[in-house]
Amino acid sequence: MTEKKRYYTEEHEWVEIIEGNTARVGITEHAQEQLGDIVFVDYTSDLQEVAVGDDIVTVESVKSVSDVYAPVSGTVTKQNEQLADAPETVNVSAMDQGWMIEMEISDPSELKHLMDEEAYQAFLAEEEA
């Protein structure tokens, strides 16, 4: 089995290609830790085309409300409806079951502007220094 590659943004979102140009998007472990207990996940974007940087999800926690931005351009094809009933899933499994949307990426070359795992870990270390 081939390990899937994840890409990261400086806003602590991740995107993972799951098949072809279909990708899942969520927030990182670091982001969910910073937010604290997540109590509500709201989809600000319907199943439609989005551009890099568009608001796609609002995450409300006991500490704050944060927007999640589209890390790449494409069409949102699916929302993780499980999060409506169990938003705490993001706290428990941010990098797996807590994914937020699936999208069909329109321009895969945008991925090269994101960080790979190694670069993201270096970014985190620098940010926390």
Image (cartoon, helix red, strand yellow):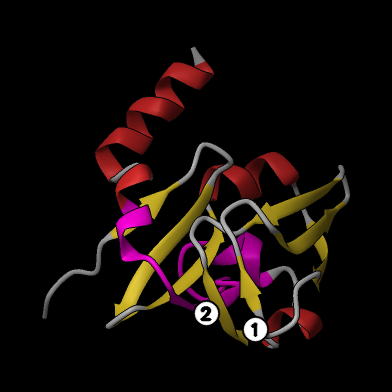
Q: Is residue 109 left or right of residue 25?
A: left
Residue in the picture at 68% in, 55% down: 68
Image: magenta residue range: 89-111
**Rendering quarter of residue 43:** bottom right
In the image, residue 91 lies at what x, y percent? 64, 60
Asked if 122 appears above or below 63 in the picture, the reply is: above
Image vertical order of residue 3 relative to residue 21, above or below = above
Q: Depth check: 103 or 12 in front?
A: 103
Return the mark for residue 102: 2
In the rendered view, tell whether residue 41 sits above or below residue 37.
below
Residue positioned 25% across, 62% down in the render: 5
Residue depicted at x 81% and y 69%: 44
The reply to whether dot 1 and dot 2 touch (C-beta < 8 Å) is: yes
Q: Is residue 99 magenta?
A: yes
Q: Quadrant of residue 39?
A: bottom right
Question: How many marks overall?
Answer: 2
In this view of the protein, which residue sits in the foreground, 37 or 8? 8
Amino acid type, callout 2: Glu
Determine which of the numbered discs, if any, sits on residue 79 in the image. Answer: 1
**Callout 1 crowding tier (Cα within 10 Å): few <14, some 14–19, many ≥20:** many
Figure quadrant of the N terminus: bottom left
User: What percent of the width, then of the height, locates residue 28?
Assistant: 52, 51
Query: Counting other residues with Cα less than 10 Å from the Cα at mark 2, is it few (<14), some (14-19), or many (20 or more)?
Result: many
Give the x, y percent position of residue 69.
65, 54
* Lower position in the chain sequence, tag 1 or tag 2: 1
Residue nearer the viewer, 25 or 21: 21
* Residue drawn at the location 47% of the way across and 63% of the way down: 95
